[in-house]
Amino acid sequence: MASETQNAQLDAMNTLKAVEDQFQTLQILNEEGVVVNAAAMPDLNDEQLQELMRRMVYTRILDQRSISLNRQGRLGFYAPTAGQEASQIASQFALEKEDFILPGYRDVPQMIWHGLPLYQAFLFSRGHLHGNQMPEGVNVLSPQIIIGAQYVQAAGVALGMKKNGAKSVAISYTGDGGTSQGDFYEGINFAGAFKAPAIFIVQNNRFAISTPVAKQSATKVLAQKAVAAGIPGIQVDGMDPLAVYAAVHDARERAINGEGPTLIETLTYRYGPHTMAGDDPTRYRTADLDNEWEKKDPLVRFRKYLEKKGLWSEEKETEVIDKAKEDIKGAIKKADSAPKQKVTDFISNMFEEMPYNLKEQYEIYKAKESK
């Protein structure tokens, strides 16, 4: 009996290794901006390539300015994004306007490029209610603060799309730490069972705040967690915008053709702290690790590729930087002019039909506000 048990355990270990070996990282551009996988190259014309680069540069400047504004006390909660531009921007670039984004709190750039006005993104950071009021036709939900909860929501939105016969997808993002949450599996399992048109992205930036991936999960490949839900999983070089675009584009095609959801793990890195709320990455990350990933910078990689094709220059990049700074200046000014929030706003927005106890409080505060 003991030998049979040992043989079964050995078979299980061999099966695990076989599954892990199936997941090869998709890469199209290497660190020097050289195409190493022409067969996977997405069908993007020169204008689209330039636009993708423009958005990535713009987003890097937005991140830098947002950090400065946070330190000045002009923004509230902020999660830095530098290093993750390929993962975030290239994935959104593969979407259509009718697709729905269910973001985590680091995924504000995708919301902006999907149509959220920049000043409202700043208001969200400040905790202003207008920052959560999405304009008509902008298919995004407010960033989810509860880790992994957006995966369950994405499964529901995607199922609704399927029932309505819509040729669109719901895409959701979480970090590597999010895969340790129950909502993560519930979301991908539900979507898989009903073949809902969803795309689930795990942005594996190596640390869930300060906890490294190896201490979160025994699996060496987070994408293989898709196997348990019976859906395809793919691991992608998350510093390579072309690889990210190709993976999301293909996943979207599968989804709208009724083939169900896909789990995509992007191997990426955040250069800054987890958030600006006191996190110190030097306490859990080494300078050597930081330097290793800075050599993989998605902007540097893509810039080299485009320059070789004659599609990018220092002048073009300067224009983007200047435009970003101008837009940010105008957006923060507009955010500053937003009406101050009132207690009555929160009370009236809480329920469609206000209960009697809140009606009493509402009248009390309304009287105070009118003085």
Image (spheres, rainbow, N blue to C red):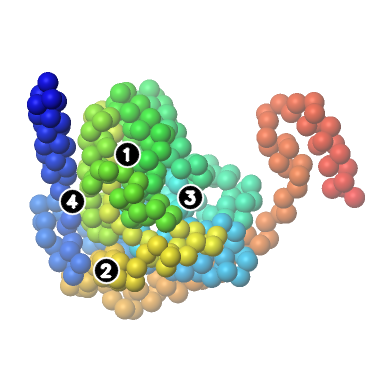
Q: Label 3 is placed on what type of residue?
A: Tyr
Residue 52 or residue 343, whichever sits in front: 343
**Where's residue 272, x and y in %?**
42, 65
Residue contact at pointers 3 and 4, CB within 8 angstroms: no
Q: Label 2 is placed on what type of residue?
A: Glu
Give the CA distance from mark 3 to mark 4: 26 Å
Residue 149 or residue 154, whichever sits in front: 149
Q: Is residue 362 above or below residue 177?
A: above
Specify few, some or many for label 1: CA neighbours under 10 Å numbering under 14, 14-19, or 20 or more. many
Whether residue 336 is visible here, answered yes or no, is: yes
Tell me which numbered mark, 4 or 1, is placed earlier along the sequence. 4
Tell me which numbered mark, 2 or 3, is placed earlier along the sequence. 3
Furthest residue toward front: 2
Give the CA distance from mark 2 to mark 3: 26 Å
Residue with the mark numbered 2: 292
Residue 254 or residue 9, whichever sits in front: 9
Q: Quadrant of residue 345?
A: top right
Q: Nearer the viewer, mark 2 or mark 3?
A: 2
Furthest residue toward bottom: 315
Q: Is residue 176 above or below residue 262?
A: below
